[in-house]
Image: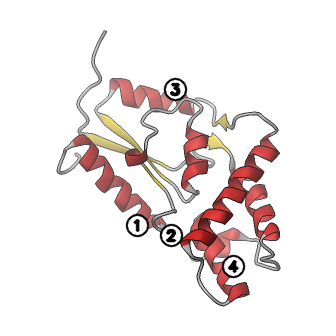
């Protein structure tokens, strides 16, 4: 058995629409959770929001309706509802991968000097579930989501920082 090569380079992946065919179901659950939280009306063209992350969009809509930012409890409640509704809409089936994504990411992980990490605008718990269909390195330190940061650029920077700590490396080539 050959060992996994030392990781000197970095591959950063988004999840929805890049690795998993999850955009439609995720957005359907998100819209339903907004209705359940009585956060209507809202601009449902998510591409128009300054930051395209679950936490930013939810907080923006919440702030317009409630005149305050979401608390950690509010975010947790909303995330749990999105998660529950996602399972309802999947009807017991797992998410599907984008064809070849699992094999490609596993190849990078097992046979190349690329470390594999995930940076997503999705809520953390749901992102973990999406990756559970066979992607490697699905753990707390190699997945950085919008739960701790609402801005995509900062999500990516934090994911890189976590990867460096995990691989005990000061920089990647």
Question: Residue at position x 23%, y 31% from top?
Answer: 6
Front-lying residue, 112 or 76 = 76
Residue drawn at (78%, 41%) of the image: 90
The disc, 3 or 4, on the residue closer to the chain's N-terminal end is: 4
Using the numbered discs, state the Cα–Cα distance from disc 3 to disc 4 in whole angstroms.
38 Å
Measure how far apart labels 4 and 2 are at the Cα level.
14 Å
Quarter of the figure with the N terminus = top left
Are the two marked residues, 1 and 2, in contact with CB atoms closer than 8 angstroms?
A: yes
Answer whether labels 3 and 1 touch (C-beta < 8 Å): no
Color scheme of the displayed model = secondary structure
Q: Residues within 10 Å of mark 2 (few under 14, many from 20)?
A: many
x and y percent of residue 61 in the render? Answer: 69, 79
Secondary structure category for the residue under label 3: helix
Label 1 close to label 4 by CB (< 8 Å): no
Q: Which mark is residue 154?
A: 1
Q: Residues within 10 Å of mark 4 (few under 14, many from 20)?
A: many
The reply to whether callout 2 and callout 3 are in contact (CB within 8 Å) is: no
User: Which one is closest to the eye, mark 2 or mark 3?
Assistant: 2
* Secondary structure of residue under mark 2: loop
Which mark sits nearer the N-terminus, 1 or 4?
4
- Which residue matches tag 4? 61
Left or right: residue 169 versus residue 153 is left
SS for dot 4: helix
Would residue 26 appear left or right of 38 to someone viewing this image?
left
In three-dimensional space, the C-alpha distance between marks 1 and 2, rounded to whole angstroms, equals 8 Å
Q: Is residue 153 above or below residue 86?
A: below
Q: Is residue 52 visible?
A: no
**Which numbered dot is residue 103?**
3
Residue at horizontal 39%, vertical 45%? 142
Q: Nearer the viewer, residue 70 or 27?
A: 70
Label of residue 110 in the image: none
Residue under pointer 2? 150
């Amino acid at each position: 058995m050959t060992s996994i090569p030392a990781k000197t380079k970095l591959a950063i992946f988004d999840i929805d629409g890049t690795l998993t065919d999850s955009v439609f179901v995720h957005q359907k659950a998100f819209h339903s959770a907004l209705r359940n939280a009585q956060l209507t009306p809202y601009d449902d063209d998510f591409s128009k929001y300054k930051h395209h992350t679950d936490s930013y969009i939810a907080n923006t809509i919440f702030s317009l309706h409630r005149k305050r930012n979401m608390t950690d409890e509010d975010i947790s409640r909303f995330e749990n509802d999105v998660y529950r509704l996602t399972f309802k809409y999947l009807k017991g089936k797992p998410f599907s991968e984008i064809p070849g994504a699992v094999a490609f990411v596993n190849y990078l992980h097992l046979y190349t000097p690329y470390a594999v990490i995930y940076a997503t605008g999705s809520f953390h718990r749901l992102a973990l579930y999406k990756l559970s269909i066979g992607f490697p390195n699905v753990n707390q330190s190699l997945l950085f989501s919008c739960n701790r940061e609402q801005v995509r650029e900062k999500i990516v920077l934090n994911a890189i920082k976590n990867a460096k700590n995990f691989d005990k490396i000061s920089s990647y080539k």
